[in-house]
Amino acid sequence: MDYWRTNLAEYEIIDNFLDEEQFRVIQKVLMSHEFPWFYQDNVTNDPKVGMTNTENFYFSHLFCIDGERNSNFYGLVKPVFDALDTKAIVRAKANLYPNKNKAIKDAPHVDYEYEHKGAIFYINTNNGCTVLEDGTEVNSVANRVLLFKPNKLHYSTSPTDEKTRVNININYF
C-alpha cells in the first residue's frame, strides 16, 4: 500500500489499498452491465439538508445495513472490510454517480451524527471528488481509500470526464 497521510486526525488517503488482483475482481463486477444498481433520487436523506435538486440523483447498491447482509454481493467486497479491519459495519454501499455533462456538487451532509469510522473506496479514476468539511478535495482514483470522519460534513461531485464515478462507502467501527 502507498500511504499519503495528511492531517491524520481528520482523514487519511491510502493508494493501492488492495492488492491488484483483489481490486480488479471487485472493479470488474461493479463496472459490469450485470451488477444491480438501484435509483436514488437524492444523495442524502438528511432532512436538515432539504436538497430537492433533480440533478442530484444517483444509483446505489446496499451490501450491509446495521450489521445485516443485504446483498448476494457481500462476499465480493469482504476483502475491503477485512483490509479496514472492521469490527462492526453500520452500512456499506456502492454508489454510482452518472456523468451529467456538468459537475454537480451534492449537498454537504453527514452519514450518521454519532462518532464512528468512515471509508470511501474508489473503484474508477475520474474527475469527480469527495470534498471534506475543511475544503479538502480528494480525487477519485481507482484502488484508493479515503478514511475520514463521516459524522463531519462532506459531499461528492459528479464526473464530467468518464461515464460514471463508482465508489464504496463504508460506515463502521
Image (cartoon, rainbow, N blue to C red):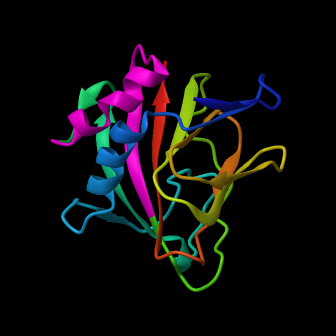
**The magenta segment:** 72-96
Q: Is residue 33 left or right of residue 82?
A: left
Q: Is residue 149 visible?
A: no
Which of the 4 image quarters holds residue 52?
bottom right
Residue lying at 48% horizontally and 23% vertically, measured from the top left: 84
140 shown above or below 17: below
Q: In percent of the image, x 40 and y 34: which residue is there?
A: 91
Viewer can see residue 76? yes
Q: Indicate the position of residue 130 as horizontal and vertical percent values.
A: 66, 53
Q: Quadrant of residue 71?
A: top left
Relative to 73, is 3 on the left or the right? Answer: right
Answer whether residue 83 is magenta in the image.
yes
Using the image as rendered, state which of residue 135 and residue 17 is in the foreground: 17
Q: State whether residue 141 is above or below residue 18.
A: below
* In magenta segment, residue 1: no
Residue displayed at 36% across by 57% down: 60
- The image shows a total of numbered marks equal to 0
